[in-house]
Amino acid sequence: MLGVANPLVSKRWDDLEVKHAWAEIPRGWELHGPAPEDYTFDMRIGLKQDKFDDLVAALYEVSDPSHEKYGQHLTKEEVAALIAPHPSSVDLLESWLTAHGLDPSACQRSRAGDWVTVRVSVAQAEKMLGTKYNVYRHGKSEDYVIRTMNYSLPSALHEHVAVVAPTTYFGTMKSMKATSFIQKDAQTIDSDADFAHLLTGPSSLATVPTSCNSAITPACLRALYNTTSYVPKATDKNSLGVAGYLNEFANRADLQTFFRRFRTDAVGTSFTTVEVNGGGDNQNQPGTEANLDIQYTEGISFPTPNVYYSTGGSPPFIPDDETPTNTNEPYLDWLNFILDQDQIPQTFSTSYGDDEQTVPLDYATSVCNLFAQLGALGSSIMFSSGDDGVGGGNCETNDGTNTVRFQPNFPASCPFVTTVGGTVRVNPEVAVSFSGGGFSNYFARPSYQSTAVSTFLTKLGHTNSGLFNTTGRAYPDVAAQAENFQVVIGGRIEPVAGTSASSPTFAGVVALLNDFRLSQGKSPLGFLNPLIYSTGVGGFNDITSGSNPGCGTNGFSAGAGWDPVTGLGTPDFGKLQALIG
């Protein structure tokens, strides 16, 4: 049923102010034509969270090992109370919807009421937001979306509404960048049986085999990051989640082949697939990214239960198709699904991202704030840092000035996630040249990293001056191996590289640390960054050589202490275990 528009209140909604606008069509996209006026879609409205600052304060308290509340993670009810919108925001939004003939009682609402979803036609949305919706095509993936170059809200709503979607965020499952790639000329091996058996018992390898320089397997990583002797004990409580997009499916038969070759004690065990928003589970279509993620989270964390979240963007917009569709918003779909579950994994890994400048600030902030909620609930969230060093392509800004600047990645740049850069080689490890790293242009530097980053900037001096935001959130936080991963895809072993390999590797180590905590009757680690930048620093192998060139420069260089190539370094499970005990 439609709400009845009240002519007496309609006038106040005519005073529109721009909320976000692009200077140019986002790169990679082209205008296809006007959106059909009667095409309907779900409009998501994110209301300002009334006590979000209190949520962030609570997040830092429960994540800071020196605070008396460390480990006392919030309940879903406590989080909901802090992120609920102010009643006046709800009242104003409902008045606005009613003025446009929409029934507020028919809206879908999130648990806390901060997200309101309403089905609208293109014509309605254009009137509400003072804009024009068009169909845009992504050349590389041939994805079609309905988006707009700008949108406005009544001035009375600006203080109350954080974001409206879909509007100016063009990213879709298919256009997002997976941070992995098959290495065409790299070595593959059939198994690591010649040294894997040496990893058991009291005479474990003291050094990592030199073969790990050219072919990475779970045995290499377990030796390198010192997890070999740890046997998980809290598998009834602990789990590890992998977020999958891009219609990428984790293949069970390939996992068994992988186990037979590289982790024989795990043969016969598998993972759980959870389908989100129409995400599939096509076992005839193994994905490089999905297989890499699940084979290495399982390979390190076994027998910890693993969950693969297959997040769909289906049905996509098809030109000339009049059926209603969802909004194809990958992060919002996955995050809202996870936050609505009663049981969620204590550790997550995600290996996807976009150039930060292609994500509107209002949208990026809303997504980043959802990660803060996950952290407050007690989950550790890992993201790969990206595979373009300090920036890929021509590194020109999209604000109309085409200025060359380093291009940070999002969500890697969100201060509420732990971002994982890449290394290569063993004895010693060095930074891999494509390791994404830099400084956010959206998010300020959080207090937990102020000392570490200030020390780096002092040493840097005037190098790269003017190319990055010296006051922004700096990343990566940590690092792990990123090349020559032996991955089974369609029954064959392929060598895969990318910080997509680093994130699940680091997440596997974190899952074991969470297992240790839970087995001792303690809480999981939750949001890691306040810990790792303080008492946890001693649990990392500092990477002191290598760099991440890009944008026609040499990028940044790894050195002693934190750096924007490898963060604080790679994990030493034994040392971290002692520090968190």
Image (cartoon, helix red, strand yellow):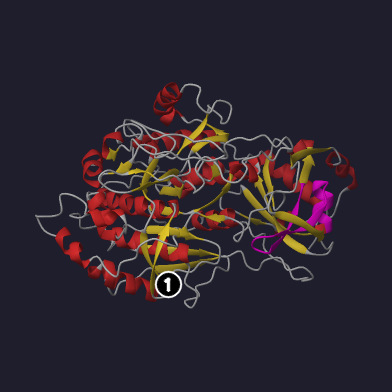
- Direction right: furthest residue: 7
- Direction bottom: furthest residue: 284
Percent coordinates x, y for residue 525 in the rendering: 34, 44
Image position of 286 with respect to 240: above or below? below
**Left or right of residue 386: residue 213:** left
Q: Count up the numbered dots.
A: 1
Percent coordinates x, y for residue 415 in the rendering: 49, 38
- Name the one closer to the observer, 157 or 298: 298
Image position of 442 with respect to 517: above or below? above
Residue drawn at the location 40% of the way across and 49% of the way down? 379
Q: Give the residue number, with chain letter if any, for mark 1.
A: 251
Please say whether residue 99 is visible from this viewpoint: no
Percent coordinates x, y for residue 490 in the rendering: 43, 75
Write the start and end of the magenta stretch as one range.
123-149
- Name the one closer to the observer, 116 or 483: 483
- Image quadrant for the N terminus? bottom right
**Left or right of residue 441: residue 534:** left
- Name the one closer to the observer, 450 or 469: 469
For badge 1, the amino acid type reads Asn
Residue drawn at the location 87% of the way across and 48% of the way down? 6
- Name the one closer to the observer, 213 or 59: 213
- Location of residue 177 (image quadrant): bottom right
**Left or right of residue 302: residue 280:** right
Give neighbour class at mark 1: few <14, some 14-19, many 20+ (Cα, 10 Å): many
- Image quadrant for the C terminus? top left
Q: Is residue 528 magenta?
A: no
Image position of 437 with respect to 515: above or below? above
Q: Is residue 130 magenta?
A: yes
